[in-house]
Image (tube, helix red, strand yellow):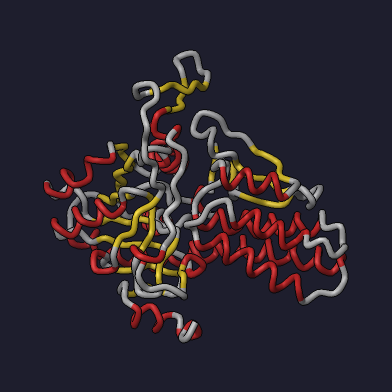
Amino acid sequence: MRVNGKQYRTIWADEQDPRVVKIIDQRLLPHKFFVEELRTVADFATAIKEMHVRGAGLIGATAGFAMYCAVLNDPGDDSGYMARAAMTLLATRPTAKNLAWAVARQQEAISRESTLAAKQKCALAVACQIADEDAEYCRRLGQHGLRIIKKISEKKNGPVNILTHCNAGWLAFVDYGSATAPIYAARDAGIDVHVWVDETRPWLQGSRLTAWELGQEDVPHTLIPDNTGGHLMQHGMVDMVIVGTDRTTRCGDVANKIGTYLKALAAHDNGVPFYVALPSSTFDWEICDGVRDIPIEQRSDDEINFVTGQTAGGDLATVRISPTDTVAANYGFDVTPARLISGLITERGICKASEDEIMALYPEKQGS
């Protein structure tokens, strides 16, 4: 997508030196646009854990490139280097399914090659495939989601008002995004859309990232505090909700950024359609009960007690917003039960959040 009119992906191998992988350091947005270079497994693990990159799709793509760089640094002996590299990556963020999926995909592909040179070539190809697929799947689900927005547009005068939570835009994937892909597709189709952007405490992915991204794409939007959504729904100011997901069970339960469950409850109470957009790499085919079985990441209480922003002088500064020594609980995600979800928007089409309909879209996963 575009940054100051120039096309970017969120991750890519350097054209001059493919041993170097480049990312956009999202911690500095929207105030600074900085491209960071990653070379070692430790670089990648830090980037994932410390949120230089974030979002299910991008975490998966980053893990794919990390495994490629691991092969480049593999001493080629029997020390178990690659297994340790995989474990290091898997320990960074527990909730997003794409991370483990990408690592396993690389491990399987690399294991089929016999020489180190062949393993390196294979790992780069697979990393690029993961990234390309992520972008293409998001583009496709955008076209499927466009149908929903178009139907709403045909029934009303004025813009289609869409509420989203956190950032499930192109910054959370390789390109297009999941929740934003239908919005961009609607914009491109000439449909008048307006987005209510939740600020999304404590990392403020909405106010820092989604608002910035939509601004770069010239999509009308309004930033709101996290607790405003229910009020807007009560007054008929939201036509639909679209969110992303970091892990979705085969039965349709959805883990997404903390606060998503509350939005789903408000939408259900007010008859507002609540959709979840995701590429298939985000499904966890092995579990059904998301509340019981999806691991929920707990992060540092510093993310709640402190906030970083730009001063009047243009510098970035971090300040405390709570009393000294305050203890805070920082759950990164919550689970929205399938019963509250109007539908899942995937690269293969739209289905109900139910095991039967999900498996009908992905019959090859039967028995997984």
Q: Residue at x 71, y 50 (%)?
A: 41
Q: Position of residue 327 (x, y in %)?
A: 37, 32
Nearest the viewer among 355 and 298 is: 298
116 relative position to 245: left or right:
right
Is there any visible trace of residue 234 in the rendered image?
A: yes
94 relative position to 37: left or right:
left
Q: Position of residue 37 (x, y in %)?
A: 71, 41
237 relative position to 256: left or right:
left
Q: Quadrant of residue 202?
A: top left
Q: Quadrant of residue 320?
A: top left
Q: Residue at x 81, y 47 (%)?
A: 16
Nearest the viewer among 226 and 1 is: 226
Is there any visible trace of residue 174 in the rendered image?
A: no
Q: Position of residue 283 (x, y in %)?
A: 46, 69
Say above or below: 165 vs 28.
Answer: below
Q: Residue at x 55, y 62 (%)?
A: 134
Q: Residue at x 18, y 61 (%)?
A: 155
Judged from this view, the residue extending furthest toward the left is 235
Query: What is the tally of numbered marks visible in this picture?
Result: 0
Q: Position of residue 215 (x, y in %)?
A: 42, 39
Q: Quadrant of residue 47?
A: top right
301 relative position to 132: left or right:
left
Nearest the viewer among 122 and 155 is: 122
Judged from this view, the residue extending furthest toward the top is 313
Nearest the viewer among 331 and 135 is: 331
